[in-house]
Image (tube, grey):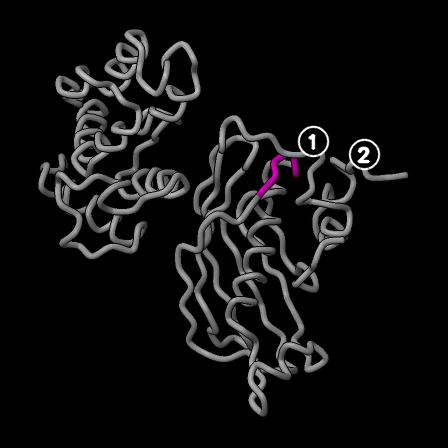
Amino acid sequence: MAMSRDEIFKEVRDLLVDALGVDDDEVTAEATLMGDLGAESIDFLDIVFRLEKAFGIKIPREELFPAENLLNNPEFVNNGKLTEKGLTELKNKMPYTDFTAFEKDPDINKLGDFFTVNTIVNYVENKLGSDE
Amino acid sequence: MRWIWIDKFVEFHSGERAVAVKNVTLAEEHLHDHFPGFPVMPETLCIEAMAQTSGILVGEARNFDEKVILAKVKKAVFVDYVKPGDTIKIEAKIESIAPEAASTSGKITCDGKLIAEIDLMFSHIDQNLAGKEFPEENFVFTDTFKSLLRGVVLNGTSSGAPESEQG
């Protein structure tokens, strides 16, 4: 049976409450994982494992949180900003995210803002949809 | 030298689950201060026992090629004390394992009675923290550490012996 977006959100919220030790009312759709919810790098792996279990999906490395590889590649980053090539790569890897505002000043420090609770819900929704 | 905080494995199912035991004794001096007149095993050291049990289980699953480091205590709930003279049983299970990390669940019991539930996350550090370099040799799984598996796991001591540490 297909899950509604609301059901996916609730499942994601519960799993983030456990993974990050936050209250459920902090986990809003717009909350950023690092800024608002205090996630660190190991938490992202924890979240990936929990998502795989909760939704019975397989999440390939870098598919959900692709920024890490990007940032370590000098072709994609110059002087703390994403290059044209880096931006293209980012958009390819995160097709569900709107980068219009970011493109004007692609400061890599602002990249964390794109990993919101919604990013995860979108990803799972797409993943569940494409499996059927 | 590595600090070993479990006594032996009594069960070992590669890549799945393992059971270790530890005998707790009043000869452990920290028990004299924790607490004076009421010696109980510190809960942090229960987590250490679980980290060693789970960590070896995770390491063995990749033939001790990875440097397995405790990265996160996901859950640690304690329901009873461990006292001198107790033999605790530490049961660990791999929940998920990926190239860069693993997640485990586990419980500690004493005479069949639940002491704690402890879930952990381990990082395979060479696969993470891109750009940082670590020593070539596997400083996590030394010979002494692997000796715990002697008699329980066939390849526990025969494979992947460090080449650089001798001499």
Where residue B61 sits, quadrant-wise, is: top right
Residue B147 in picture, x, y percent from top left:
76, 52
| Residue at x 48%, y 64% (from the top left corner) | B107
Residue B41 in picture, x, y percent from top left:
57, 76
Residue A4 in picture, x, y percent from top left:
9, 37
Q: Give the range drawn in magenta.
A: B64-68
Q: In this view, does B82 lie above or below A25?
A: below
Work out whether mark 2 precedes mark 1 in sequence or the reverse, and give the earlier one.
1
**Pointer 1: residues within 10 angstroms few (<14), some, or many (20+)?**
few
Element at label 2: loop
Q: Which residue matches tag 1?
A: B136
Find out whether residue B151 is within the magenta segment.
no
Q: Is residue B131 above or below residue B107?
A: above
Left or right of B10 in this view: A2: left
Q: Which residue matches tag 2?
A: B164
| Residue at x 30%, y 50% (from the top left corner) | A20
